[in-house]
Image: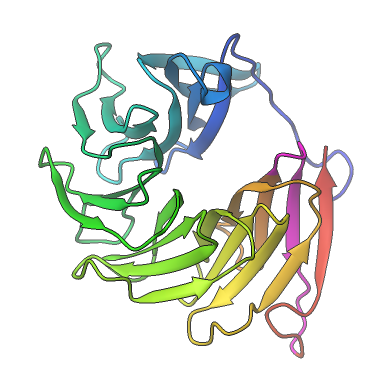
Amino acid sequence: MAAGSSVTRTIRIPGRHGYAVEFSPYIPSRLACATSENYGISGCGTLLVLEQNDAGLVVLKSFDWTDALFDVTWSEVSENILVTSSGDGSVQMWDTSKPEGPLQVLKEHTQEVYSVDWSQTRGEQLLVSGSWDHTAKLWDPSIGKSLCTFTGHENIVYSTIWSPHIPGCFASASGDQTLRIWDVKSPVCKLVIPAHQAEVLSCDWCKYDQNLLVTGAVDCSLRGWDLRSVRHPVFDLHDHTYAIRRVKFSPFQSSVLASCSYDFTVVGFFKALSPASDCGSSYRVYLWP
């Protein structure tokens, strides 16, 4: 990246610590942030709707909840609908066009809900959530209860992410060191991948390859997994010095992914484009402080 080609915009919210941020799929300049008091250990949470303009980042709207908010996802049917997950075991649906509290509160998990994601495939409007109670749950936003509970993980489910390619398919990452692939038609896991020898805190699906996922873990590594052959990772990247909190593939380039860590850095990984290279053969790494 050439010097001077990027702009950094920062906003600080007194008394709140950010846990998750997601760009709006409708308005490129808009994003949502799930925040908590006291790093989520105690206190309440706030959902922030932010806008980028020439002055920087500004708060358009904010919504308070009685417990920490750990994740946020945008609706795929309305630019005003957001869903958050909370430390009290609930999932909240918000309409940002209305000033009052959440439209709906879904509470079936018995411990903190650390992850929530809205399906992006056509023909289905489903949510999946992951919890400290070791389960993932499937929700239809039009119904006030879960459709299915997925069991099998032996530790906290830190991340749940829908496949952008395969309807009814999602992945989960857990403190039991595994990445798991699920089909909503069955409560039994389709595939268990022993992804790391440490807690797996995050996973994401490549937007351009239905068989490629990435995991980030407490062992400070990022690993890529081809679902057609999972005995060994297709890449194993090390550039962080502390646990990796979140990892994301680029929605615009198949060869780019980024990670953020408890070492206070964000790292971008760019695959070297060479006809002779395989999926993990060569990477250039750029750091932004």
Percent of width and height locating residue 225? 57, 74
Q: Which residues are magenta?
A: 261-275
Percent of width and height locating residue 14? 60, 9
Q: Is residue 281 above or below residue 276?
A: above
Please say whether residue 83 is one of the residues in the magenta stretch: no
Q: Quadrant of the C terminus?
A: top right
Q: Is residue 205 left or right of residue 153?
A: right
Q: Residue farthest to the top? A: 14
- The quadrant in which residue 3 appears is top right
Percent of width and height locating residue 243? 69, 47
Q: Is residue 266 above or below residue 104?
A: below
Nearest the eye: 224 or 79: 224
- The quadrant in which residue 233 appears is bottom right
Q: Residue farthest to the right? A: 3
Percent of width and height locating residue 51? 52, 24
Q: Is residue 70 above or below residue 147?
A: above
Q: Is residue 141 left or right of residue 218?
A: left
Q: Residue farthest to the left? A: 143
Residue drawn at 25 percent across, 15 percent down: 101
Question: In the rendered view, how is the structure colored?
Answer: rainbow
Residue drawn at 65 percent across, 20 percent down: 54
Residue drawn at 10 percent across, 42 percent down: 143
Nearest the eye: 119 or 18: 18
Query: What is the tally of numbered marks visible in this picture?
Result: 0
Nearest the eye: 47 or 11: 47
Q: Residue farthest to the bottom? A: 276
Q: Is residue 84 above or below residue 231?
A: above
Residue drawn at 26 percent across, 71 percent down: 188
